Amino acid sequence: MSADATYAPAVELIGALRAGTTTSTELVRRALARCEAVNPRFNAVIALDAGAALGRAAELDRLAAAGGSAGPLHGLPITVKDCFEVAGLPASNGVPAWRDHRPAHHAEAVRRLVNAGAVVIGKTNVPAYSLDLQTDNELHGRTRNPWDPERTPGGSSGGAAVALATGIVAAEIGSDLAGSLRIPAHFTGVCSLKPSAGVVPTQGLMAPTPGMLRVPDLTSVGPMARTVADLGLLLEVLAGPAPADARAWRLALPAARAPAHALRVAVWLDEALCPVDASVAAVLEAACASLARAGVMVDRQARPAIEPEACFRSFLELMYAEMSGGYPESLMRAFAVAARRPPGEDWTPLTIMPGAVVQSHRDWLVSSEQRACLCLPWTEFFERYDVLLAPVAPTVASAHDEREFAARTVRLGGVDRAFMQQSFWCALATLAGLPAAVVPVGRDPAGLPVGLQIIGPRLEDRTVLECAAFIERLSGGFRPPPVVPGAP
């Protein structure tokens, strides 16, 4: 084990634990010291329980000394996004009214990580209700991007991404509705995986309020890390049916369709609905070109037979309906008033929001049927191709925007558009329930990271990871941010 393990991958740390060259107590102490050194500047971690973490680490070290093991993550320190319930730790989901909420039980995904031997040292910041593409809230304040503290790390898994990028921990979990796993990974230069819908249970996820038992329609739970290998390790622990179904159902994700060099790769990097900045496009083009030079079959013209605008609108209508489950009655009444004004033909993500929030159950059924119809072309597409490469977002990390969500804009193709427009590329996989990984592939001229999204066939998450790992090798993968202090 090297003297400086700040940016060591989880698989390397676990290997050192198994070899006896380090202990869980040592790794937890390192993580806590790193947090003390960097967190005041970036505000990624918003709750710690050092005593409980060190106590758990000591138990695991005694078990290891006796020749035992708690599982594949034995002794690994992690943090957990604050929208997941962790027994004994605050779970506010960025909402002041829930500052004192301390759940008695772990969320199912957290339970699986802990049962596999992970040591939870703390919680990471989110926007209020985990419903924003920035990470800032009244209770815990703003999380800053370690590549440029004046910029956002994205949301809603912004704190999780920064905890990884600054070397506090090597593994995290997040949730994803409109890109909450993927956009922060792209903005901070780390990796993430939005698994296929239903692969990882959502029980115990405050989606967006505590105690909700229903399974969200679009939200997924998945891993974040600095390497693709670590995503694969975490997926093996997290994946499986919900406890109530496990008595009869089993999950058997298929192996990758082929070795990475033999995969059939389609590339979709441009779209008028969400044009990509030239500086971002250049980095993505270079990554795709490296695949072609490595002998991979790359098709830049192939597209699923979907209408992008219809796809994005269907996503927004269903997303807003899902979000509304946690809205207070006063807000619902305000949306009902706004919904009386029709959005018109020139709709935007904002103009259709009121009607989508208060839509009838019948309207929701119509939207759900449209969603099902939009999934069929993806099935046909993935009979001819194995993965689709696409942007994560149209820009690199933007400056913190303190305006109300409805007033925020993003400049795309020289035009100011609704802030939510930048989720278009992530919506593609979300609507169809497809697995989508993000891997860093370079930096723009200003030195800010750029991630590439790898989308694959439903339930073929391992094919996505196979391709992502190959791209990671070609592009160099994670690089530590230059503004982060050295390891303590």
Image (tube, rainbow, N blue to C red):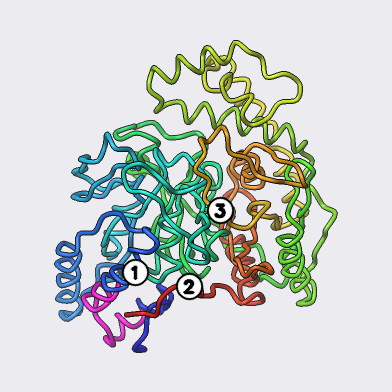
* Mark 3 vs mark 1: in front: 3
The magenta region covers: 14-31
Name the residue that disc number 1 marks: 72
**Helix, strand or loop at disc 1?**
loop
Q: Is residue 248 visible?
A: no
User: What's the amino acid at mark 3?
Assistant: Ala
Quarter-of-image position of residue 74: bottom left
Residue pointed to by mark 3: 399
Q: How far apart, in angstroms, are the residues tagged by discs 3 and 1?
A: 39 Å
* Identity of the residue drawn at 75% across and 70% down: 286
Q: In front: 430, or 295?
A: 430
Earlier sequence position, callout 3 versus callout 1: 1
Residue 425 rendering spot, x and y as whole percentages:
66, 47
Q: Is residue 45 left or right of residue 408?
A: left
Q: Residues within 10 Å of mark 2 (few under 14, many from 20)?
A: few
Identify the residue position indicated by label 2 in the image.
483
Q: Quadrant of the N terminus?
A: bottom left
